[in-house]
Image (cartoon, rainbow, N blue to C red):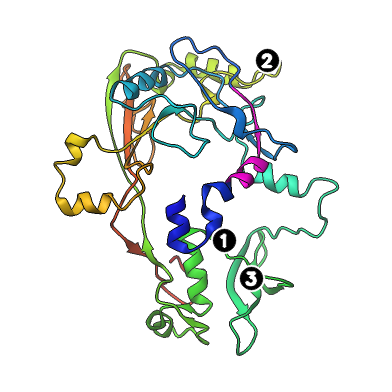
Amino acid sequence: MQKWADEVDDESYTWQNFLPFLKKSVDYSAPDIPYLNSTNSHDDSLFNVNPLGPLQVSFGRYEDPFGTWAQRAFQGIGQPAINGFQSGKLIGSSYIPFTEDPVSGFRSSSYSSFLLNAFAPGKDPSIRLYNNTLARRILFRPGTNIAHGVLVSSSAPGNTNQTYTLRARREVIVSAGAFQSPQLLMVSGIGPRETLERHKIAPIIKDLPGVGQNLQDQIFFGTSYRVNLLTTSAALNNPALTAAAIAAFTNKTLGASGPLTNPAVPVFGWENLPNATFSLLPSSMQAALQTFPPDWPQLEFIPASSVFSAENFVASDPVDGNNYASISTAIITPFSKGNISISSASTTSPP
């Protein structure tokens, strides 16, 4: 994370400065099932400070069969077992926790954790949530680059859009994601002058060529195999197994358990290219990769208890009576860069 801090000249991105916010956000539950064919070892010291945070973090109550073998495979190719990834160290392999309620098995989402907590009795009564509302443009004080509000439009089923202004007493925080944050800035007059003038956006608050530039994403691919153990394929082939999994998940007496408490295979692996492979790369690529910190992994390995698909893992299963599993790989050090631009002067048009 130090690399990110250096890139944007903001020390709040360093691990030491980020960790306190992670700690105070989480309500952590350690694994509570026996692991018969694998080992789930974690350093719990980074969690459960007082007071507990609103975000539930726990482990699925099911030892995924393919995950147990994936753990052994990762260790067999040189990814050592480490005590979880929550310490900020990634090189190695480990079980991973999920943002999941340990009793109900339901996802602990931003809504069910942070938002509902913010609206709980006794909390700040001034917080308001605007449903079905689209930010149209950031508003600035005339002749300045000081934001003082946002033009928005709201709609409800059967009603026409209502456009109105939300005024800011202190600041406007732009948090619309990798695609729509730059879109919102550009339609508000902040971005490359050529783009703003092409779409007749005025006034131009700031000619800022970097807005929407340097978009990077990870390359993600995988291979699938028939395997001799139960995977998601088994439930697709056998409705009785599906019914049993639902019954285990919805058990009100014992709490949720079974395969549906694992939203994914709960074992990940991270590594850098072995020296023998790294030495085969062109010298220019070797030099580029060496600009990353040594503890920044180049590859991530993600097991999947299903046929690999970039869109729908379940729909890709042939349902032919066999069990399938995959190892997906992501390249964590991409160098290709793209950009996000706008197609009109309105946020109603996709960027």
Which residue is at a point 69% across and 36% down the rendered structure image? Answer: 49
Which residue is at a point 48% across and 69% down the rendered structure image? Answer: 183
Q: Is residue 125 left or right of residue 318?
A: right
The kind of residue on which mark 3 rests is Val
The kind of residue on which mark 1 rests is Ser
Q: Which mark is residue 254?
A: 2
The kind of residue on which mark 2 rests is Leu
**SS type, badge 2:** loop
**Distance of mark 1 from mark 2, alpha carbons?**
40 Å
Q: Residues within 10 Å of mark 2 (few under 14, many from 20)?
A: few
Expressed as whole percent of the image width and height from the top left, the position of residue 120 reads 80, 45
Indicate which disc, 3 or 2, sits on the residue closer to the N terminus: 3
Q: Is residue 163 left or right of residue 88?
A: right
| Farthest residue, direction bottom | 143
Which residue is at a point 33% across and 33% down the rendered structure image? Answer: 316
Q: Is residue 52 magenta?
A: no
Res. 53 visible in picture: yes
List the residue tagged with mark 1.
175
**Distance of mark 3 from mark 2, alpha carbons?**
46 Å
Q: Which mark is residue 152?
A: 3
Q: Residues within 10 Å of mark 3 (few under 14, many from 20)?
A: some
